[in-house]
Amino acid sequence: MYFTAKGIATMKKHLFLLPGLNTAKELSDLLENSGIDHDRIHIAHEDHTRAMKYHLNDLNFLEETDTIHSGERGFMIGIVLAAVTGFFTYNLLDGHPAGGIGTVFACLIALGFPTWLGGMIGASSDNYRLQPYHDHIQQGGAVVMVDINNPIEKERLNETIKHYAPARAAGTTSGFDNPFSGQLIPRKHLS
């Protein structure tokens, strides 16, 4: 994990674009030989069966889709709706014997529905980290994501990438989902 100025440790995901699954397999093997654990190397490619045949870490459903990220956004909207609903419901049912229970029930619905809806929208959308590379993946390219925890692994990654010409650096993201990052409207997942 990297340590920031505030002392908080974060995992970084380093993304690389490759022309296809064969080069992704080569890069994965090189990274493993350099000492990076196999479980920290993930491949985004449209042909999941072939990726599994190559013994690559294909993305799982939650890594490939935007379910968690969009659900977090829905949860944040739900918090605001629950507060507003709670205020009005409490004032409307003031003095009623079931006013407290009714208010809590209305708040739970106001919190749960946007969270559920956000997750459902995200389930049919690309992960916000992969949205910029959607066309590259659909055209047969691969995106390799490498989770790096410490400076030693980062040095191994940089040394390996420096000597592997087909890999093109595509950026670095945090290992934690950030509901404030990514596009406002998720891109539909086609595969």
Image (cartoon, grey):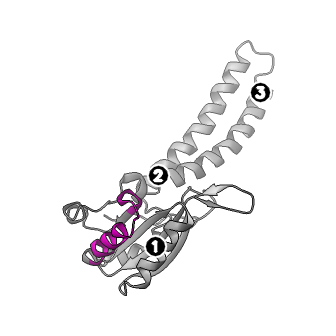
Q: What's the CA distance linking mark 1 and mark 2? A: 29 Å
The amino acid at mark 2 is Thr
Question: Is 38 one of the magenta-colored residues?
Answer: yes
Residue contact at pointers 2 and 3, CB within 8 angstroms: no
Look at the picture and state if 98 lies above or below 141: above
Of the numbered discs 2 and 3, the one sitting upstream in the chain is 2
Indicate the secondary structure of the residue bearing disc 2. helix
Category of crowding for the residue at label 2, using alpha-carbon neighbours closer than 10 angstroms: few (below 14), some (14–19), many (at least 20) = many
The amino acid at mark 3 is Tyr
The percent coordinates of residue 49 (x first, y second) are 21, 61
> What's the magenta bit mostly, secondary-structure-wise?
helix
The quarter of the displayed image where residue 55 is located: bottom left
For this rendering, which residue is in front, 18 or 118?
Answer: 18
Q: What's the CA distance linking mark 3 and mark 1? A: 56 Å
Residue range (magenta) = 23-41
Q: Which residue is tagged 2? A: 67
Q: Along the horizontal axis of the image, is 6 left or right of 12?
A: right
The mark lying in front, picked from 3 and 1, is 1
Residue contact at pointers 1 and 2, CB within 8 angstroms: no
